[in-house]
Image: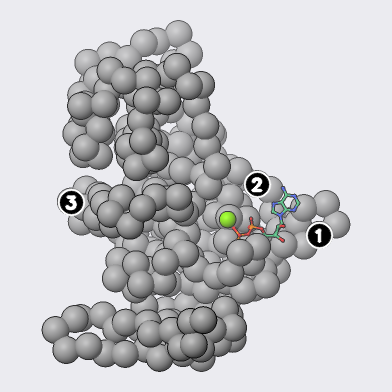
Amino acid sequence: MEIKGENLVISYGDYTAVENIDIDIKKGEITTIIGPNGSGKSTVLKALTRLLKYRKGSVYLNDKNLLDFENKEFARQVGVLPQKHSAPPDFKVKDLVGYGRMPYQKWYSKNNSDDEKIIDWALKATGTWDLREKSINECSGGESQRVWIATVLTQQPEILFLDEPTTYLDISHQLETMRLVKKLNKESGIGIVMVLHDLTQALEISDRIVVICHGKKYSEGTPSEVITAQMMKEVYNVDCDIINVPGRNKPLIAYKEII
Ligand code: ADP
Ligand code: MG
């Protein structure tokens, strides 16, 4: 499973949000997109997942042009959790999670026993099994985020796109979500592409990082290639030291002059 975006130009009306971006997502890896607010991260993610048309360039999923996919065929391979999402508040958790099976069903069919097995697996894998009879509005922020991840998991995607999956979560739920993402990647081999703001988390979890700034790709590579004091200055206008600490396998970002 590989997704390749070539020379993408993406506009909203007359405004060009993304210019000439090449992006290559490899099978089974965790790729994180970072960059300042409004730099074009969600725009790129939407173009790679057919939620937004691009003006120029092309995207290939396993050498097949994105434009040549049927919706259901695409949804069986690619799961997307957008930055903003909502469900009717009285929706039961297990019903919402069951909706992820739609790409596998005819319009008139109900969930069969195979579907039920996968729904149960997704509920268990995300730690939402005990929530299944609750309605979605009875879930906390962290719980509902896991429920949404369960919903895209029932699509059984080979690659999962998550746009800021930890925003609005407290630190313990952020780390819990990151551990879940890592587990899905390691144990089920699901490729992950996500947008993160927390650079320490991006450093820890990613195989590759892509930096987007002002609608252009600034750099890409392994976490230690990408997270440098120079990048932090040029992209975020923040002074910091990147410090190697004995006993930790990833460096730490030490911000200077915080206040
Ligand atoms: P990021 O996800 O990096 O914060 P976005 O991809 O959401 O940034 O946005 C990139 C740019 O495109 C921003 O300048 C934003 O204002 C603009 N933009 C995003 N969505 C729309 C939209 N629906 N209509 C017009 N402009 C948009
Ligand atoms: Mg965004």
Mark 3 crowd level (few <14, some 14–19, many ≥20, 10 Å Cα):
few
Which of 140/12 is in front?
Answer: 140
Task: Answer with left or right where residue 158 lies relative to residue 90.
Answer: left
Q: Is mark 1 within 8 Å of ligand 1?
A: yes
As shown in the figure, which amino acid type bears the numbered disc 1?
Tyr
Calculate the distance from the C-alpha at mark 1 to the C-alpha at mark 3. 42 Å
Q: Is residue 4 visible?
A: yes
Identify the residue at horizontal 41%, vertical 71% (top origin).
199
Calculate the distance from the C-alpha at mark 1 to the C-alpha at mark 2. 14 Å
Task: Answer with left or right where residue 17 lies relative to residue 201.
Answer: right
Q: Position of residue 12 (x, y in %)?
A: 77, 53
As shown in the figure, which amino acid type bears the numbered disc 2?
Leu
Q: In this picture, is 78 found above or below 170?
A: above
Q: Are marks 1 and 3 in contact (CB under 8 Å)?
A: no
- The mark nearer the N terminus, 1 or 2, is 1
The residue sitting at the right extreme is 14
Which of 50/226 is in front?
Answer: 226
Secondary element under disc 1, as helix, strand or loop, is: strand
Disc sitting over residue 15 in the figure: 1
Query: What residue sits right under mark 2 in the picture?
Result: 52
Dividing the image into four equal quarters, which quarter contains ligand 2?
bottom right
